[in-house]
Amino acid sequence: MRILLTADPELPVPPKLYGGIERIVDLLVTGLQSRGHTVGLVAHPESTSKASQFFPWWGKQSQNKLDALKNTTVLWSAVQRFQPDILHSFSRILYLLPLLNSGLPKVMSYQRNPSLRTTNWGTKLAKGSLSFTGCSDYICGIGRKAGGVWQTIHNCVELEKYTFQPTVKADAPLVFLSRVESIKGAHQAIAAARQAKKTLIIAGNQVNSQEGKNYWEQEIAPYLGKDGIEYIGPVNDEQKNELLGQAAAMIVPIQWDEPFGIVFAEALACGTPIISSPRGALPEIVRQGVDGYLVNNLEEACNAIQNISQINRYDCRQRVENCFSADVIVSKYEHTYQSLVSIQMQIA
């Protein structure tokens, strides 16, 4: 098959540091081409993913109207030049507008909460040529309210990048790895670690908005350098692998409905249990008492920390191998493409 993929214009594929969607797109490019497919990519001009053909976006911002017009033109041109059997968008449904009423099979993937209005009009205009995937049952449950055909295909990790660590030291630290902002629960991780008298290493980028700065100054900074609480800043892939592998658990007690959260699968790939909250997609990733604990309050978080040694790290790794590995997820997308192309051939 000839498969054309798109990613949002803000970050290159693969990303230099953070960028979950861009990592998934890069894994798809690599995985699909290894299976004999020809893959084109429309993405940020600095993308280095090894696609067969590359088409850079002209517009840099997804939310800018002029940039949206530019990128709609880029995608139309890419389709004419690449002649795909199927178009798979991880970017904006607006970019598909001139292509919606064509017979070309199209997949629109959501890694964030879908807009019910835009998915509804997209479904109507496409007249059966557009289907949807979501990175979790949680996301698909929202999308189905607007109609259309939805399928859950979870996010994935490249297992080769994560070293399984079957054991850790008795005094192994807890790790918080995410953006350091309120919705990710860094303050809750600090409170739990201090009460449980455990070392906590915080890794991730700070948020530069005024709200983010206030959060850092009021909820995070006062505790650093005390009671074993340490901040090490953003980490690259190699540092992340080492950091997660040495941790007793990754504690990210989210305060919002997480669409997926690739970092949770990354931790499990290292054999590292999860302590988080039962919101969004987390119940789809973490089996309670098997891969970690989903907690509702500080008391439950402290109990989870005390009981973390009861989690079998082999089970954590196996969870990713069976459900969230790149090979498993690429196969699911490949099967979806083949089904949609076959249906379109029958209609034609």
Image: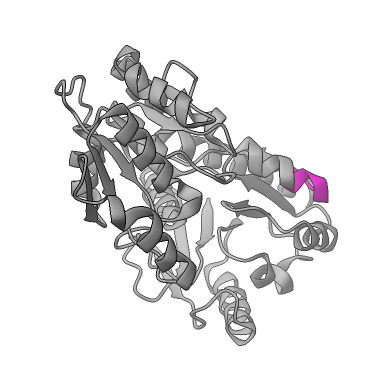
Which of the 4 image quarters holds residue 227?
top left
Q: Position of residue 112 (x, y in %)?
A: 59, 53
The answer to whether any part of residue 169 appears in the image is yes
User: Which residue is found at the position 46% from the left and 38% from the top?
Assistant: 253
The way the protein has been coloured in the rendering is: one colour
In terms of depth relative to the viewer, which is nearer, 211 or 100?
211
Please state if 262 lies on the left or on the right of 153 as rendered: left
Q: Which residues are magenta?
A: 143-149
In terms of depth relative to the viewer, which is nearer, 339 or 222?
222
Q: Residue furthest bottom?
A: 66
Q: Position of residue 62 (x, y in %)?
A: 57, 74
User: Which residue is found at the position 34% from the left and 54% from the top?
Assistant: 220
User: Which residue is found at the position 30% from the left and 57% from the top?
Assistant: 221
Q: Position of residue 172 (x, y in %)?
A: 18, 28
Q: Position of residue 270 (x, y in %)?
A: 27, 31
In terms of depth relative to the viewer, which is nearer, 331 or 207?
207
